[in-house]
Amino acid sequence: MDILTEALASMRTAHPASVRTEGRAPWALRLPPVAGAGFHVVLYGTCWLIPVDPAAAGEPVPLSPGDVVFLRDGRGHVLADHPDTPPVGAESCRVDGGSPIGTLTLGGDGARTSLLCGNYHLDQGRPHPMVRQLPALIHLPTRHGRHPELAAAVQLLGAELENPRIGSVGIVPALIDSLLLYVLRAWFEDQPAATAAGWAAALRDAAVAPALTAIHEAPATAWTVESLADRAGLSRAAFARRFTSMVGEPPMAYLTRWRMTTAARLLRESEAPLTAVAAQTGYGSEYAFAKAFKREFGQAPGGYRREARAA
């Protein structure tokens, strides 16, 4: 069971949106907050990422070719050739449609910077704790042999955008979709084992990782703290403390969360009857499932399904 893939899939509500941004100095683009997570890939040239609220988000970040930035909660920010350049909104830029994605052009006639900018549509109303624990901004340079798989994805994206050919319309969205997994895998693997905390530690912990895998593989199983502790090879109390400190919530709370997350996906993406959804998520009856679902989501499963299909 790939917990990272499952956690992200549980939050995704649509395919990523993206645009190629071409700036020539002097240029500065103000980007408003988005409902999800933002990302930028520097394909050519250099620029700065400037938080709108430096007190909350830190200092301006210099970016170079191959750099990838991930903004966990899609907060507003500015991209610019220099921190002092006055920013404009996207409505002031020239936008060209085209294959495989559109291009936004701004600035003067100076040095060129080319970026891929976009956002992943993630449900921020119920963020998975793995995502909630991430830094607000992740900056991953891929030069000098760092993160070779991520660097390869960036190079492939750059090649397809610079010289679109047959198949590019299908290749580019698939690469952008995969980029999120490459980014988060690179960040998790960057965390030193000796000092890693939270989910960065949980995913490789000899006790907690097997318990998480068990919950994700078989949410319908009647797990207890005792049965999960047995799989972890710890006492009940020691396991509960360790799991809670890393995952951010007790084992049974996480089990309920994952059952409800699985149920919501089944309601959105399948035609399975409520009795089948209840059985697949560990509830003995449709009534018990509906009661638990309404407590978690504030509406009955049938209403949730109808609303999700209409969106």
Image (cartoon, rainbow, N blue to C red):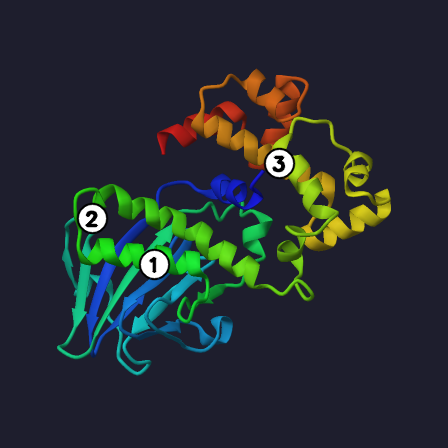
Rendered location of residue 206, percent (x, y): 73, 49
Which of the 4 quarters of the picture holds residue 48? bottom left
Rendered location of residue 239, percent (x, y): 80, 47
Judge from the rendering whether residue 175 lies leftward or rightward of residue 127; answer left or right. left
The residue located at (22%, 46%) in the rendering is 168
How many numbered marks does the figure carry? 3
Give the alpha-carbon distance from disc 3 to disc 1, as whole Å. Answer: 31 Å
State the residue position of label 2: 100
Q: 162 or 131, which lies in front?
A: 162
The residue located at (18%, 69%) in the rendering is 106
State the residue position of label 1: 154
Q: 116 or 85, which lies in front?
A: 116
Give the alpha-carbon distance from disc 2 to disc 3, as whole Å. Answer: 36 Å
Q: 34 or 4, which lies in front?
A: 4
Q: Quadrant of the N terminus?
A: top right
Packing grade of label 1 (10 A; few <14, some 14-19, many >=20) is many
Query: What amino acid type should be assigned to the residue bearing mark 3?
Result: His
86 lies above or below 266:
below
**SS at circle 1:** helix
Q: Is residue 172 visible?
A: yes
Judge from the rendering whether residue 271 lies leftward or rightward of residue 176; answer left or right. right
Judge from the rendering whether residue 203 lies leftward or rightward of residue 25; answer left or right. right
Packing grade of label 3 (10 A; few <14, some 14-19, many >=20) is some
Checking the image for residue 216, the label placed there is 3
User: In the rendered structure, which disc, 2 or 1, sits on the residue that comes first in sequence?
Assistant: 2
Query: What amino acid type should be assigned to the residue bearing mark 1?
Result: Val
117 lies above or below 101:
below
